[in-house]
Amino acid sequence: MIPRYSRPDMVAVWSPETKFKIWYEIEAHACDAQAAIGVIPKENAAAVWRAKDAVFDVGRIDEIEAVTKHDVIAFLTHLAEHIGADDARFVHQGMTSSDVLDTTLNVQLVRATDLLLVGMDRVLTALKTRAFEHKDTIRIGRSHGIHAEPTTMGLTFARFYAEMARGRSRLLTAKAEIATGAISGAVGTFANIDPSVEEHVCKMLGLTPEPISTQVIPRDRHAMYFATLGVIASSIENIAVEIRHMQRTEVLEAEEFFSPGQKGSSAMPHKRNPVLSENLTGLARLVRMSVTPAMENVALWHERDISHSSVERAIGPDTTITLDFALHRLGGLLEKLVIYPDNMLKNMNKFRGLVMSQRVLLALTQAGVSREDSYRLVQRNAMKVWEQGADFKTELLADPEVTAALTPAEIEEKFDIGYHTKHVDTIFVRVFGA
């Protein structure tokens, strides 16, 4: 991923230096396990750890690979340059390249997930803070983009919190699913390496042994992992789209923080655009772009092929780096988001009480009027608000068919805004706990 949308901690997870360090640890731990069961001399296993503090030369490994055309062999050759050819002769005993590559990929994905969880927690904290801050801030709820009934800004933040909390739970599940390792040798039969080696290496790396691998770890695990990242990205976009809508000039119920010296347009000095939210929408598309290739990686020929490899070299770093950046961008956006409660009230009252239509409809049915007639009476008066700019309550009070069923006091009561917020506390307890 380009530096513009990258954070250093996540980039470091995918650096060649990190990758080769994990490769080395896998090989060294495997040597320890092999020595413990007498397959290789203990002194040779100990010698491998002489490279513990070594800085593996990426350029040198690339130089060797240019000849060998094989990245793992190039690394093993370079490792031998550090510890000596004689001590290196037992390294990679009974293993195959995928043992190193697949286990390393999963270690990196686990580490990446830990960073993603930090970003998720920042977003959740911001959403919870803003939800309680605006728990009772009245705004109009919309369906199809059209005024529906009153809600609160706090409930808007609360539903996004609940959605992101589900995403966090899914991410934990995905982390557990991906946290497996395989040191099972060619075609996964353990013919040339004891299963205890796999158990030891996985334990040292914080992984679980893959119950059955072929020559690779099954890719349905990775498909599920990247699908989870895709869902989280869609939730980010869901929030971003709402903010973009609220910042529209004719709505202006909220807007992104506009810092001193910031410019909105090269042509129009008055512009203050929702650029962060729009950027998040684009980043979400990039994250979801990895889902289909990850799904297609599941079907491999027989015990393995490498059709998945090129895909994962791209989507592993690109997707986690992009989502990490997006989460922190969203967290910062929410922390500084400017809310305009007065504009929310103005918008809700723009159609002069029309949003209370359902209360009047229900009251008429409870007063004995058929639902069909009740709907006709309410809609007849509502259309005068749409078409003539009339006041809904005034029209209802002047309609003899309505007043024949409801007293003026009963009609007046149907315009109490508190009616729509009486269960906000109940919803907050459901979302955030008591």
Image: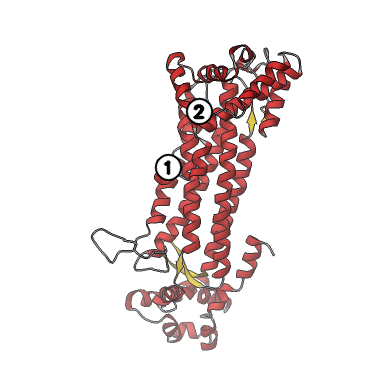
| Residue displayed at 52% across by 47% down | 232
Report the amino acid beneath label 1.
Answer: Leu
Residue at 68%, 12% in the rendered image: 191
Q: CA distance from mark 2 to mark 1?
A: 18 Å
In the image, 268 versus 355, the foreground residue is: 268
* Residue with the mark numbered 2: 297
Q: Is residue 290 left or right of residue 101?
A: left
Say what secondary structure mark 2 lies in: loop
Which of the two residues, 433 or 336, is positioned nearer the viewer here? 336
Q: What is the number of the mark on residue 286?
A: 1
Q: Is residue 355 above or below residue 119?
A: below
Residue 377 point in image, percent of width and height: 45, 76
So how many labels did they put on this image? 2
Where residue 343 appears, as percent x and y from the top left, is 42, 74
In terms of secondary structure, where does tag 1 sit?
A: helix
Residue 188 quadrant? top right
Circles 2, 1 touching at the beta carbon (< 8 Å): no
Between 391 and 240, the one nearer to me in the picture: 240
Is 27 on the left-hand or right-hand side of 282? right
Residue 314 visible somewhere in the drawing: yes
Amino acid beneath label 2: Asn
Give the mark nearest the N terminus, 2 or 1: 1
In the picture as drawn, the residue positioned furthest to the right comes out as 37
Circle 2 packing at 10 Å, graded few (<14), some (14-19), many (20+), is some
Residue 299 vs 423, above or below: the answer is: above
